[in-house]
Image (spheres, helix red, strand yellow):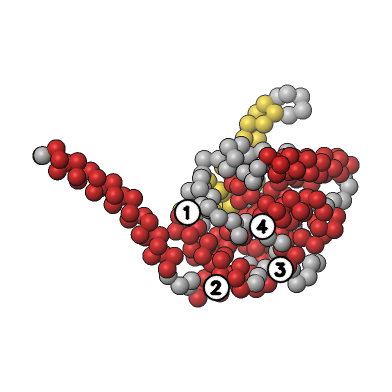
Amino acid sequence: MNPWIFLLLVIVAIALALWIPRFRLRQVMKQPFPDEWVEILERNIGIYKNLPMPLRLQLRQKIKLFLHRKHFSGAGGLEVTDEMRVTIAAQACMLQINRRGPIYPRLKYIILYPTAFIVSRMETNESGVSGHAARGLLGESWDNGKVILAWDNVLHGARNFVDGQNVTLHEFSHQLDSESGNTNGAPILAGESSYRSWASILSGEFRVLRKKARRGSRSLMDHYGATNPAEFFAVATETFFEKPEKMARHHAELFKVLRDYYRVDPRNWKAAER
């Protein structure tokens, strides 16, 4: 083959490889949001009807983008349905409202189990003895582009958007956290001053929660957040979105830094908190 023709074919192939995905995405984003998906949102997302219409429309566009880019698969005999996909995408994209840029760029796969799943991990006890231990989990976020969720708990958390417990918000906040390169409770922020404020406020709140957990004292945030800074950020995210008024009253500085980071104020969405 003539080398010039070969070079031309290579250039055309590269151009098509770049153009076709963008074309398909534009076509997807131009499509109207299906009525069936709206019904799923209204039925399953407890907060959806309280969102102002501009935020609803923005959320729908982000859901379409999320579902176009991410692959869902079932495990443990579960067959993935549109209800599952839309319900999870809506909550994941709630963390992306008013934010520009790609949506969870490192995430590729969402794996769903029907209920809590068992994992075997190497753990070390207080005596320093290591061994495999089986644990039941409701969700996991991996740095290699995977989120694993238990569908029954996903649905419960989506419909009960006031109890401060939401496995989808929790695991997807870990995905945001990991975008900085480390899942350590410090996601990508605006600048150096933001990191200083973030570190000061979250570390202080983390220490307080650890003390309460050790004493068995009541706290607004789940004691699981005392495990480490990454889990604290995830638990704080759940509380911020599901119990915003209480967080603003009892953890004002923490609420402010999370409001600045997520660029929303969920107090405006809450008809009432139980």
Using a 10 Å C-alpha cutoff, classify the residue at mark 3 as few (fewer than 14 neighbours), some (14 to 19) or many (20 or more): some
Residue type pointed to by label 3: Trp
**Quadrant position of the C terminus in the picture:** bottom right
Residue 218 locus on image (x, y percent): 87, 51
Q: Residue under circle 2?
A: 38
Q: Residue under circle 3?
A: 269
Q: Residue 263 carries which label?
A: 4
Res. 10 in view: yes
**Quadrant position of the N terminus in the picture:** top left
Using a 10 Å C-alpha cutoff, classify the residue at mark 2 as few (fewer than 14 neighbours), some (14 to 19) or many (20 or more): some
The relative height of residue 229 versus residue 129 in the rendered view (above or below) is below
Q: In front here: 215 or 123? A: 215
Residue 178 figure quarter: top right
Residue at image x 56%, y 74%?
Answer: 39
Q: Residue under circle 1?
A: 70
Residue at image x 15%, y 40%?
Answer: 4
Give the mark nearer the N terminus: 2 vs 1.
2
